[in-house]
Image (cartoon, rainbow, N blue to C red):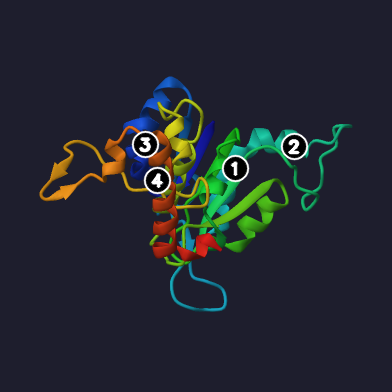
Amino acid sequence: MRIDIVTIFPEFFDVLDLSLLGKARQSGLIELGVHNLRDHTHDRHHSVDDTPYGGGAGMVMKPEPWGDALDAILGDAAANDDAAPDGDAVPDGGSAPDDGPILIFPSPAGDQFTQAMARELSLEQHLVFGCGRYEGIDQRVVDHYESRGRVRLVSLGDYVLNGGEVAVMAMIEAIGRLIPGVVGNPESLVEESHEDGLLEYPSYTKPASWRGHDVPPVLLSGNHGAINAWRHQQQVDRTARVRPDLLA
């Protein structure tokens, strides 16, 4: 998978050199490009924001640097998608192609990110993330690229962050670990929270007794049928207690 990120804080993503995702990059399972939005500005202050039309608090990210940055990433793919069979370009505003990169903007106004979405996106060949800041990105950027390809606004939940970088890191972590070969034991992915609509059961390891707390006897019994039944019931009980909405 190819992942591109546009941000004003490229150093934020140095952490992707660590752990399983770092190994996945070294082995070629994931190809990563981190792009500084300020490299696509044309004034001496490298400005990426300005005051909002209509007034109001905060600043809005300007469309020009975003357009130049995304064109540089999407240019080849967009050029191929925009070319009609006879070589004539499809006019701007025409129907968006069903393939090619997916452009993702973290936004509290977007669709909620879920494990199902992570699995869906893990099947893609190219994801492009745009990390907004301040009061967000000029809406015309989203509108323009929706006319050229696939664009998704995605929210981590019902809260607001200072910028999109944290949300993008969370999404890349959730998506990247589902790419075949990234996690050493693929069976561990099947038994996780949300994979079957339930939260994960509690886990234990040695020693069997610690500070007066004992491992449930069924896990020491060697009876795998009983263990599986106990784990499933733990999933149901935990989900009913913590996230009853998932049971519905």
Q: Amino acid at mark 3?
A: Leu
Residue 81 is marked as: 2
Where is residue 89? Give x, y as percent: 81, 40
State if disc 3 and disc 1 touch (CB < 8 Å).
no
Q: Amino acid at mark 2?
A: Asp
Which numbered mark, 3 or 4, is in the foreground of this view?
4
Q: Count residues near mark 3 (Cα–Cα under 10 Å), then give few for <14, some for 14-19, many for 20+.
A: some
Secondary structure found at label 2: helix
Where is residue 218? Give x, y as percent: 31, 42
Q: Give the answer, above or below, for where 202 lies relative to 142.
A: above
- Gap between marks 4 and 2 measured at Cα: 49 Å
State if disc 1 and disc 4 touch (CB < 8 Å).
no
Closer to the chain start, of discs 4 and 2, is 2
**Label 4, on which residue?**
231
Q: Amino acid at mark 4?
A: Arg
Where is residue 31? Give x, y as percent: 48, 29
Tell whether 19 sits left or right of 174. left
- Gap between marks 2 and 3 measured at Cα: 30 Å
Where is residue 194? Give x, y as percent: 48, 49
Q: Amino acid at mark 1?
A: Glu
Tell whether 110 sits left or right of 205. right
**Label 3, on which residue?**
16
Closer to the chain start, of discs 3 and 4, is 3
User: How many dots with numbers?
Assistant: 4
- Gap between marks 2 and 1 measured at Cα: 22 Å
Closer to the chain start, of discs 2 and 1, is 2
Which numbered mark, 4 or 2, is in the foreground of this view?
4
Which of 157 and 74 lies nearest the eye of the viewer? Answer: 157
Q: Give the answer, above or below, for where 219 lies relative to 243.
A: above
Tell whether 5 sits left or right of 85. left
For this orientation, the residue located farthest to the top is 27
Q: Is residue 169 visible?
A: no
